[in-house]
Amino acid sequence: MAGFLDRAKEQAQRGLTQGKQKLDEVQAQRTGADLLKRLGAAYYAERRGSGSPEATQQALQALESHIAANGDAFLRS
């Protein structure tokens, strides 16, 4: 009986770990998509004359930092 409970506990722990990894991945993708959207908005505002190159550069740097930390998988989804 103890062996069964140990295996069940192990499987539950693996499931929790996999679930957390997937959640982290989804959150990173959402953040990346949001940063990409902000970059597009900053660039559009700059081109229309209501934004600044500094705002575009800040948005680009934030996106590049996110990519360096989390990868660029969100660009392909």
Image (cartoon, helix red, strand yellow):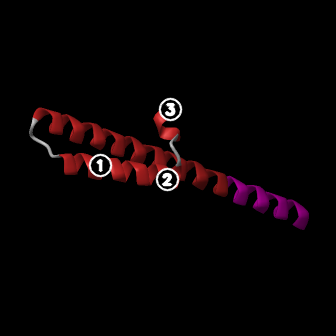
Residue 18 horizontal side relative to residue 39, left or right: right
Kindly identify the amino acid type of the residue bearing the numbered disc 2: Ala
Give me the C-alpha separation between circle 3 and circle 1. 19 Å
Specify whether residue 14 is in view: yes
Residue 68 horizontal side relative to residue 31, left or right: right
Q: Check disc 3: other Cα within 10 Å, few if <14, some if 14-19, many if 20+.
A: few
Mark in the foreground, 3 or 1? 1
> Residue 51 location, x and y as percent?
14, 43
Camera-side residue of 27 and 13: 27
Rendered residue at 48%/39% (across/down):
74
Mark identifier at residue 46? none
Q: Which comes before the other along the chain, label 2 or label 1?
A: 1
Tag 2–tag 3 contact (CB < 8 Å):
no
Disc 3: which residue: 76
What element does badge 3 sit on?
A: helix
In magenta segment, residue 2:
yes
Disc 2: which residue: 68
How many discs mark residues in the rendered view?
A: 3
> Residue 28 location, x and y as percent?
47, 49
Rendered residue at 29%/42% (across/down):
39
Kindly identify the amino acid type of the residue bearing the numbered disc 1: Ala
Range shown magenta: 1-15
Camera-side residue of 54 and 67: 54
Q: Check disc 1: other Cα within 10 Å, few if <14, some if 14-19, many if 20+.
A: many
Camera-side residue of 20 and 30: 30
What element does badge 1 sit on?
A: helix
Mark identifier at residue 59? 1
Q: Name the quadrant containing residue 56.
A: top left
